[in-house]
Image (tube, rainbow, N blue to C red):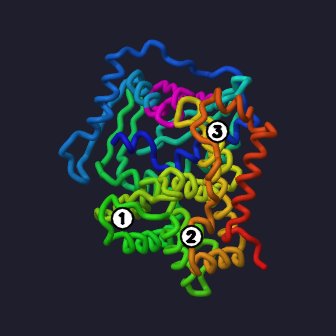
Amino acid sequence: MRRVISTFSWLVVLTIIAVLTVGSMMLLDHEPLINQDQTVTPAERAWVKQWLANNPPRRKRIGDAVSFNLSERQTNLIANTLLTQFVQDRGRVAVQLEPQRAQVTISLALPWDPNDSFVNLAFDLVENGALPKIDNARLAGLPMPSALVQMLADRALAAIESTQSIQHVSLQHDQLAVNYLWRPDLLERIGSGFVADAALPTLLRYQRDLSAALVTLRRGRPVQLADLLKLLFTKAAEQPDSADPVAENRAVILVLAAYVNGHPIRDPADTKATRLPYAHPVLLRQRQDLGQHFMTSAALVTQGGDTFSGMIGWYKEMSDANGGSGFSFADMSANRAGIRLAQRATASPDSARQVQQRIAAGLTEDDFMPVIDGLPEGMDQQAFAANFGNQNNVVYQKMIQLIDERINAARLFRPTP
């Protein structure tokens, strides 16, 4: 349950951050709508930890009914604890429960912004049958485009409904009540529900190909991202001429991105506990994090374009430098290489087939991932500012130019003679 509540899927979280970050380019506030709650007691922190650890109750079987009721205070404690997992101490959320309605406000501080700018998002949840609908969304005090709000809301609700697990969400004064059917794979089912119905059979086909290739490996044994890319893109190249190569490549990228992030694609309508491939560490340059950066950036290009993907990579590295693992140009290199792969693999049918053929002919890491030798890593905010300033600094731009030159030299991205 902790994983279910914390995030619907790796893709949902990144999409939300992308929307907030891209929106923030135009709609920024200099003050957060929500300040950090200084009144949280040690007893409340202990309660949240215990609640997350014990939900759902142990010994539940697949399909068992589960329910929980939270007060407004408890809802806010849990929501802020989970948000902190993604943005550390850079964001706050406030939920106000009313009869048949909940007002939700999110304040997200942009990392390393000298002007202390914030993205402030507010919306209402309104009871609408089993699941509430999103209403009256506002970004930085201004109404968000209705089409964008509706698109995100429809995708989220359709993904949840497709699992047939969430039975009812009730919003009352000082009470949030949720009834659902327990499934240990609910996270994967909801995440898979974000995939368009027309694309799901193709993704599931590549998921089966991936499962068949990994089934003989000892659990926990690392695999190389280059080998998985070659496996699935070769399968794509073997499809009949009537198949759309762009759609095939997009499916390959999404399946691999889901797998390296630990959430394999699952048919949300499948009521059986179908075995999915074991979670093997997927390595790129002998590092698991680089494979995750590479494939996640590639997947975001297929979903929202390279602007979303680039902004996500920048936001993640800036946040890491502000109390996380530190700013890493090696991570940025993997981000930009993943973006380049997705661009080439989905730009046009001709480009898509060319990528399939080049990968099927043989693939090594050097063919798609530049070397990371000499790229600074692990820099905190002070070290980054002293050496590179900010995104617009000449020294920073030269480092990005160096990364791009290395990517351009990779065999997979060289122009066709």
Specify the amino acid type for callout 2.
Thr
The tag earlier along the polypeptide, 3 or 2, is 3
Location of mark 2 (residue): 364
- Of helix, strand and loop, which one carries label 2? loop
N-terminal label among 1 and 3 = 3
The residue under the point 65% across, 79% down is 353
Q: In the figure, 175 relative to 134: above or below? A: above
Residue 411 is covered by the magenta coloring:
no
How far from the left and from the top, in percent, is residue 184?
A: 30, 51
**Residue occupied by mark 3:** 20
Kindly check if marks 1 and 3 are in contact, taking CB atoms under 8 A apart as contact.
no
Quadrant in which residue 246 is drawn: bottom right
Mark 3 belongs to which amino acid?
Leu
Please provide percent x and percent y for residue 409.
72, 65
Mark 2 neighbour density, 10 Å: few (under 14) some (14–19) many (20 or more): some
Which contiguous range is marked in magenta? 82-109
**Residue at screen point 69% across, 64% down:** 343
Residue in front for this viewpoint, 367 or 338: 367
Q: Is residue 237 above or below residue 48?
A: below
Cα separation, mark 1 vs mark 3, equals: 33 Å
User: In front: mark 2 or mark 1?
Assistant: 2
Q: Secondary structure at mark 3?
A: helix
Tell me where residue 74 sits by quadrant. top left
Residue 319 visible to an observer of this rendering: no
Type of the residue with mark 1? Pro
Kindly identify which numbered label has been placed on residue 277. 1
Q: In the displayed structure, does residue 84 sit left or right of residue 310?
A: left
Q: Residue furthest top?
A: 39
